[in-house]
Amino acid sequence: MRWQFTKRSNADSKGSLMSNTTMRSGHWLVLLVLSTAGTGCSGSTSEPDSGSESQEECSEQFTGPVDPSALIDDLEDGDGLIAEVGTRNGGWWISTDESGGSVTPPANMQPPAERILGGRCESEYAMRVTGTDFTEWGAVLSLGFRYDGAELPIDISDFDGIMFWARVGDMNSSSVRIQFQDSTTHVEGGVCNAEPGSSDECWDGWGTEVAPIDTDWRLYKIRFDTLSQRNYGLQGDAFDLESVYNIDFNLDPNSVFDLWIDDLWFYSND
Ligand SMILES: [Ca+2]
């Protein structure tokens, strides 16, 4: 098993990113999914551990937490920078294994948001990445929280999880893993090994599979305390919520991927 990563930093751009793997394993829990129906906006929530369920019409749909500091990015400004909230000033980034496949928008630059044809309720823009023919670890759509010449961590310990909307296109054959890089797994944390293939290598982030996922928009709500590493790089005792660098959406090698992500927030249970 060979785990690989690449990292691209560009002094001209905020954000960066990397990381992915050819194998996925472990526990994958998506704690809450709002399934869509008809309009692509209404939906039902279900939380496996509680069994609770509710229906929301498009006009009444959840539009985000009241806490203004919870917004990560809604993409409505059309650019590849996240919302400037607190110390957060990072951006989106696409990386690939550079095995010869194609990806749109291009890798190693800040991707623009894409207009949602017909919109999604109040939302007109989302982030989209499509591609195929990568054969090593695939591709990754990442969101860096903070940048000042290098990637910097933020403290998200005031929050219990993250929520976002997502869907895939008709041709998509990839699974989607969301993962976070923290003080243990990010190279800037200074403890993991930047050398690919080493037993204590970087980029074995804390995550879970985004599932089920299909062509309907759904709201995914993922608790931080459910996330786990994939046990190939340096292992942390726990996800370090006080030092988190970025979010990765990992896309499979040997697949066709077409992923949309929209309206990301942190949330608190209280
Ligand atoms: Ca949006």
Image (cartoon, rainbow, N blue to C red):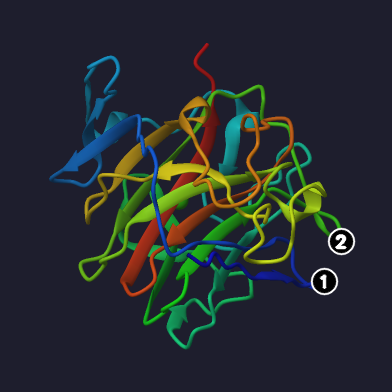
Residue type at mark 2 is: Gly
For label 2, the residue is 149
Q: SS at mark 2?
A: loop
Q: Residue 228: percent from the left, percent from the top? A: 50, 37
Residue linked to disc 1: 11
Q: Residues within 10 Å of mark 1 (few under 14, many from 20)?
A: few
Who's the residue at 71% across and 42% down the image? 184
Residue type at numbered disc 1: Ala
Residue drawn at point x = 27 percent, y = 50 percent:
213
The percent position of residue 175, horizontal first and vertical second, equals 32, 57
Q: Nearer the viewer, residue 31 or 226?
A: 226
Q: Quadrant of residue 48?
A: top left
10 horizontally vs 260: left or right: right
Residue 255 seen in the current view:
yes
Q: Are there few (<14), some (14-19), or many (20+) residues within 10 Å of tag 2?
A: few
Q: Residue furthest bottom?
A: 100
Closer to us: 262 or 93: 93
Is the CB of mark 2 within 8 Å of ligand 1? no
Q: What label does residue 99 carry, if any?
A: none
Q: CA distance from mark 1 to mark 2?
A: 7 Å
